[in-house]
Image: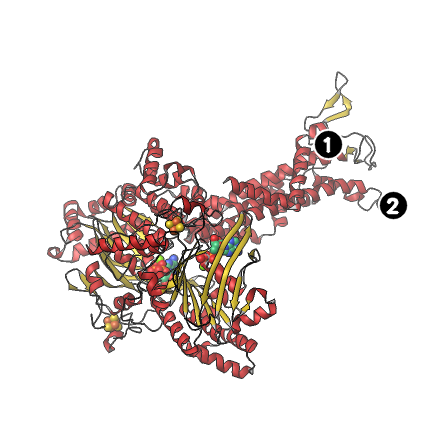
Amino acid sequence: MEKKPLLEVKNLKTYFYTEDGIVKAVDGVDFEVYPGETLGIVGESGSGKSVTSLSIMRLLDPNGEIIEGSQIIFEGKNLLELSDDEMRKIRGNDIAMIFQEPMVALNPVFTIGEQIMEAILLHQDVSKTEARKMAIEMLQKVGIPEPEKRIDEYPHELSGGMRQRAMIAMALSCRPKLLIADEPTTALDVTIQAQILELMKELQKEYGMAIILITHDVGVIAENADRVVVMYGGMVMETANVRELFKEMRHPYTWGLLNSLPRLDIEQERLYNIPGIVPDPLHFPPGCRFNTRCEFADEKCRKEIPPLYEVNKEHFSRCFYYQKVEEAQKLKKAGESA
Amino acid sequence: MNTELKRTLRKLFKNPSAILGFSLLTFFIIVAIFAPLISPPINPMFPDENGNPMKLDNPYIMPILSWSSDPVPPSKDHPFGMIAGRDILYGVVWGTRTAFKIGLIVVTASTFFGIIIGSIAGYFGGWVDEVLMRITDVFLSIPFLLAAMVLTTILGSGLDKVMIAMIIFGWMATARLIRANILQVKEEQFVLAAKALGIKNYIIILRHILPNTIFPVLVQATMRLGSLVITAAALSFLGLGAPIGYADWGSMLNYTRNYILGASGQALAYWYTVFYPGIAMVLFVLAWNLVGDALRDVFDPKLK
Amino acid sequence: MSEKKVLLKIENLVKYFPIRAGVFKRIIAWVKAVDDVSFEIYEGETVGLVGESGCGKTTIGMTLLRLYEPTSGRIIVGNEDTTYYFMPYFKAKKYIKKTYIKKFENEDPEKFTGIDKKYYELYKQLGESGFYSKLLSNIKEKRSEFRKTMQIVFQDPYSSLNPRIRIKTIVSEGPVMHKVIKKSEIIDKVKAALEEVGIHGDHMYRFPHQFSGGQRQRIGMARALLMNPKLIVADEAVAALDVSIRSQVINLMLDLQKKHNLTYLFISHDLSVIKYISDRVVVMYLGKIVENAPKKVLFEDPLHPYTKALMSAIPVPNPDYKKKRIILTGDVPSPVNPPSGCRFHPRCPVAKEICSKEEPPLKEIQPGHFVACHFPGSLK
Ligand SMILES: Nc1ncnc2c1ncn2[C@@H]1O[C@H](COP(=O)(O)OP(=O)(O)OP(=O)(O)O)[C@@H](O)[C@H]1O
Ligand SMILES: Nc1ncnc2c1ncn2[C@@H]1O[C@H](COP(=O)(O)OP(=O)(O)O)[C@@H](O)[C@H]1O
Ligand code: SF4
Ligand code: SF4
Ligand SMILES: [Mg+2]
Ligand SMILES: [Mg+2]
C-alpha cells in the first residue's frame, strides 16, 4: 500500500441548521480512496452516507455547512478551499456522481442525448457532431440497445434500468477519475441491479477509475467493494478490506449488522437482533453513538467517544473494546461448530 | 404534538401579513360583538312613554334620524356622516354583523354541500362520480349573476333569498377540490387497511378520509368568505339583495351610488357616503384573504 | 404437508386493470396484472410470494382481501367459496349461476370434487332457489367473518397508519366493529396487543408520527392481530425497514406465528428474506406463477430458469461465496402486452422455438413442486 490516495477525507463534519436544532449528519468522518479501487460505504438510513458524498461534491442544501477543520483532499488539493468555478470544473471532469433516482439527476425537458452532449461539450474541446458521436458510443457502452434511436428520447420514455444506464453514460462521458455512486441500484429490480453492477465493474476496469459505492445493502458491498467503510450515526465505525470486514469484524455494530441479515448462502436458525432503534441525529447519545444498542456498552462508552483504533494497517475500529468483539465472535463460531 | 403546535404558531406569527390578517379579523369580530354598545339600536326621534329613546324592533333596519334625505357630512354626533336620514356609522357597524352572517352562513352551507357531494363522488367513484361531476359541471357552466337573478325573481328579492342563491351556486369549487383530494387519500394504505378491517364506508369517509383532506377546503372556504360579501353586495347593487335602509354595506353602496359623482361643482363632496362602507368591505375581504393565506402556509405540507 | 388443512385456495385468479384514455374514458387496453394464478395455502404455514416489481404480487394480496374485485377465478377459504361475498346482490347471483348452477346442470356429478361436491349436495338437497338463498343469506355476517379470517400488513410504515387518529383507535376500531372485543375491554386489549408486538402499552394515546418506521410496522401487526385472524397477508412488510430493524420485525412475526398459529402469505421481492421466513415459495413473473415448491426444494434445486436467474442475482453478504452469475438481458416486459407463449422467453437463456409459441402449463414435476417451463432444469 505505497500508493498515494486519490481522495482523502479528513475529519469531515457536516451539520444542518434546522428549526428543531442542529443535525450533525456527518460528525468526524475519515477515509481514503485509492486510484482504481472501489470503496464501499455502508450504513443504515440517516447514518450520513449521502451527506458525505454531497459534501465531497459540495452540493449540500443551503442549510448545510461543512464545519471548519474538515478537509477533502483530491489529488493534493483541498476541495473545500476551491472557488465555486474551480469546483465546477472538478465536478464532471474529475469527479462524477450518480444517484438512486435517475429522474432527479436527469432533466425531463431535454433528451438524454442533449444532456450527455452538454456534459461532453462543457468539459472537452470537440465539435457538436463529434460530441453526438461520442454520446452514441457512450450509450452503446452502457448497454442501451439502438443508441442512435434512444439518444433522442426523453428520460421518461426509458425504463428505470435504462435511465440508470443513461445516467452512468452521462457521468462517465468525461472519464472522471472518481465516480461516486449513491445507492445506484436501490430503486431497481435485482435482475436489473445485477446488470448495472456488472456494467459498473466493466467500465471501471476499462477506465481505471475509482468508485465510491454507497449502499445500505451489505450484499452489494460484499460482491463489489475492495474496501469498506461502515457508518453509523454520522461517524465511521469500522474500516477494513472487504474480506477482513466480513470475517474478522472488530466492531459490535458491524457484527450485529452482519448477523441480522437473512442470507441465501447459509442456513439460519434465528436472526440476531440489534435491540433498540436507529438514533435520531438531533439527539445522539453522548459517548459512543452506538452505546444505546450495544451489548458491550459500559460507563466509559456512555461518556467518551471512542477513537478509531488501529487493528492493523488497513483495519480500524471505533470501539473501546474492539478486542472483545473478536472473542465474542470466536465464542459464536465455537458454538456453531459444536 | 405540542412541539408541532408551537412550531405552527411560531410560523404564523413570524409572518407579518398573517398578523395583519388576524388583527383585522379580530377587529371586525369585536365590532360585530359590541355593535349594540358602539351604535345602540335606538331611535332618539321617537321617545317612548318614559321619555327614553325608542328601542328598535329590528336593529338591522337603520333608524331614520332626520327627514332630509341628502347626505350630511361627518360631524361630532355622526362621525361618518349621514345619508337618507340615517347614520353611516350605524350602518357600517351593524353591517359588520350582516357581513359575518352572509359570509358564515353561505360558506358553511355551501362548503357542507360541496363536501358531501365531492366525498361521495370521490370515494365511490365509477358512475356515481360521473353523474355527480356532470351535475357539478352544469352548475359551473351557468353564469352566477344570471342564475341569481332568475332565482330571486322566482323566490322574491331579499337578503335571505340572495344567500340561498349563493349557496345553491357556491358548492362546486369545494366539491371538486374535495373530490380531487379524496382520490389521492383513497389510495393511502391506511384507507386500504380500514377497508380490509371491514370498517363501514361512512366511518372510513368521516374518520380516515375527510380529516386528511379537509384542510385545503377550509383554506378555500376562508378565502371565499370575504369575497362572498362582495358578491352579495353586487346583488344588492342590482337591487336583488337587502332593501334600502338595511344595515348592509352592499345596499348602502347601492343607495349612495347617486352621490358617487358628488354635487355639481364639488366632485368629491359626498366622499364619506362611499368611503366608509367601501373601506369596511375592502378590509373585510382582505382580512379573510390574509387569514386564508396564513392557514395555507401552515397546512401545506410541501412548505413545511 | 398433505394431511394439513387447506386454509385458502385460489383457483384461476385473474385480475385485469383497464387503461382508459380519451374524452369518453374508453378502455383502450388492459393491464394483465394477475393472469390465471392458482395455489393453496395450508393452515399454519408461511407461503412466500416472490417476484420482481410489477409482477402482480400486491395485486394478488389485494384481490385476496377483496380490496380489488377479481376479474375472474375463485377464492375459497376453508370450506366456503368467498368469491361473491363482496359483490352486489345481482352480480353475486350471476356469479353463482355461472360457477355452480350451469356446472351442476351440465356436468357429470361423479367428477365433482372439493367445494363443487359439497355445493352439489347442497344444491340437490335445497333445489336451485334454496341453493341461491343459502349462499346469499346472511351476507353481512359472512363478510364480517371473512374480515376476521384474513388481515393485511402493508409495506409503507408512513402511509399505513392514519396520521390523525390515536394508536388506540387505529388498533381497536376493526375488532370493536366486528365485536371481537367489547367496548369496555378496549384499553386492556389494545394494551396487551401493543405489548405483544413490543410497543409500550401506555403509548396507545400517541399519534403515528411519534413512532419510528419499525415501531409503526409493529403497530400495523397489532392492528391485524387484534382481529384474531387466521391468515395475515404481509405485503413487503419489512422492505422499507433498515437492516437492524428488519430482523427485529421478522423475528417478531415468526414469534407471533408460533403463538397464535397464524398462517402467512409473505410477499417480498427479496429472496433472502423469503428463504428465511417461508415454508413454501411461489415465484411469479409477469402475472403468472412460474414455480411453486417447498422452500428447501426450491432453494436446493430450482427448476425454472427465471427462479435460477433470480437466485443468482441476489447479492450475498459473503465475499468468499462463489457462485455462477446468470445475468439476464433486457427489461421486464410490460404486462399490457406480455410476450406470447412463455412470458419469460425474450429473456430466457435456454429458450427454444416452442417457448414463444406455446404457453407452458404449471405442472407438478415432483410432489408439491410445480414448474411452468417446457424445459425445466435446463439452465445450469
Ligand atoms: N389500480 C391499478 N390500476 C392499473 N394498473 C395497476 C393497478 N394496480 C397495479 N397495476 C399494475 O398491475 C401490475 C402488477 O402490479 P402489482 O402492484 O401487483 O405488482 P407487485 O408485484 O406488487 O410489484 P412491487 O414489487 O413493485 O410492489 C403492474 O404492472 C401495475 O402497474
Ligand atoms: N437538508 C437537510 N436538512 C436537514 N437535515 C438533513 C438534510 N439532509 C440530510 N439531513 C439529515 O442528515 C442525516 C444523514 O442523512 P443522509 O446522509 O441522507 O443519510 P443516508 O446515510 O441514509 O444517506 C439524516 O438524519 C438526515 O435527515
Ligand atoms: S465503544 Fe462501547 S458502546 Fe461503543 S461499540 Fe464499543 S463497546 Fe459498544
Ligand atoms: S418455457 Fe422456454 S422460455 Fe420459458 S422458461 Fe422454460 S425454457 Fe425458458
Ligand atoms: Mg442516502
Ligand atoms: Mg407490491
As drawn, the residue found furthest toward the right would be: B265
Q: Which mark is residue C303?
A: none
C365 lies above or below C278: below
Dot 1 and dot 2 within a common chain: yes
Q: Is residue B68 left or right of residue A136?
A: right
C148 lies above or below C16: above
The chain identifier of the residue carrying mark 1 reads B
Identify the residue shown where x is 56% and y is 43%. B8
Residue C103: quadrant of the picture? bottom left
Residue B55 horizontal/vertical position (percent): 71, 23
Q: Give the camera-side residue of C328 and B40.
A: C328
Q: Which residue is tagged 1?
A: B62
Q: Amino acid at mark 1?
A: Met
Ligand 2 contact, mark 1 (Cβ < 8 Å) = no
Label 1 sits on a secondary structure element that is loop
Identify the residue shown where x is 66% and y is 31%. B33
Residue A312 horizontal/vertical position (percent): 37, 62
Q: Amino acid at mark 2?
A: Gln
> Pointer 1 and pointer 2: residues touching (CB < 8 Å)?
no
Label 2 sits on a secondary structure element that is loop
Residue C263 horizontal/vertical position (percent): 24, 49
Q: Which residue is tagged 2?
A: B266
N-term-proximal mark, 1 vs 2:
1
- Residue A8: tell me if it is visible: yes
Residue B154 horizontal/vertical position (percent): 60, 42
